[in-house]
Image (cartoon, rainbow, N blue to C red):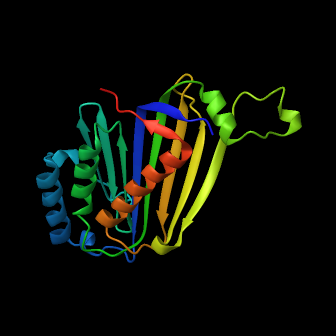
Amino acid sequence: MTELIAQPIYTELFYRATFQEPIPDLFKEEGMTALLRKIVKDFGIRLNQIKVNRESPSDAFLTFSIFEGETWFDVSYGLEEITARLQRPKDEEQVIRLYSTLADCFKQYPMSRQRMNIQHQLGVQGDSGAYLKSLNPQAPNGFEDKLTGRGVFYTLGIEEHSLVVHISVAASLFVKGGVFVSIENDFNPNNYGFQRAFSIVKEGGEFVLKELGIHIEQVA
């Protein structure tokens, strides 16, 4: 297999937590007030940055966004699930800080499922086409004279963690000559709090990139 030296041009992370039961506290004035105060204090934002949408209680009852330089952190907090998207993170410390702060807002509620996905648009040194061909050398005969790109999809089952990992690797649509890598982690049923699940995902992501032969160099 051909190996790649790569630099992350654009990275996006997505997190979804599904609760075992709907959170009753948000229906109560004192419960919602306490949560609003905590979000304002812990994230250092103003109250008017938080939007309340009573028409979408399941997954978007409270929504807010945070901008830190080029980084955008978008959160939807509902009675049944929470989602959070992080675009263009500065570094790992920022990722851990933002997601850990959010997780602290719902740590008392058991989760039935957690999903953590990371997507990289990578600039690469060398021939990305040759690399992708080394991962997926075979193509239907009828494709040969029309083939303009290759990709692979893998699914890993990690029974000890009730974890399924979906891995996609393809030519990047946004970075010329680059590679797109997606690693989707699904804890179902979920047996962990956020911190433990994040640690498993981090270690697993490093393993996946190593096995794919992708060596990521951080942009200075």
Viewer-proximal residue among 162 and 23: 162
Place of residue 160 in the rendered image (x, y in percent of width and height, measured from the top left): 48, 74
In which quadrant will I find the C terminus?
top left
Instruction: Give whichever of 125, 83 is nearer the camera.
Output: 125
Q: Is residue 17 rendered to the left or right of residue 139?
A: left
Rendered residue at 15%/64% (across/down): 33
- Residue 75 vs residue 171, the one in the foreground: 171
Give left or right: position of 217 versus 101. Answer: right
Residue drawn at 26 percent across, 51 percent down: 96
For the point 22% across and 63% down, the residue is: 105
What residue appears at the point 33 percent right and 46 percent down from the top-left corner?
74
Q: In this view, does 80 lie to the left or right of 166?
A: left
Residue 123, compared with residue 191, is above or below; it is above
Q: Is there any visible trace of residue 179 in the rendered image? A: yes
Name the residue furthest right: 142
Which image quadrant: the N terminus?
top right
**Horizontal and vertical percent for residue 206?**
43, 50
Number of numbered discs on residues: 0
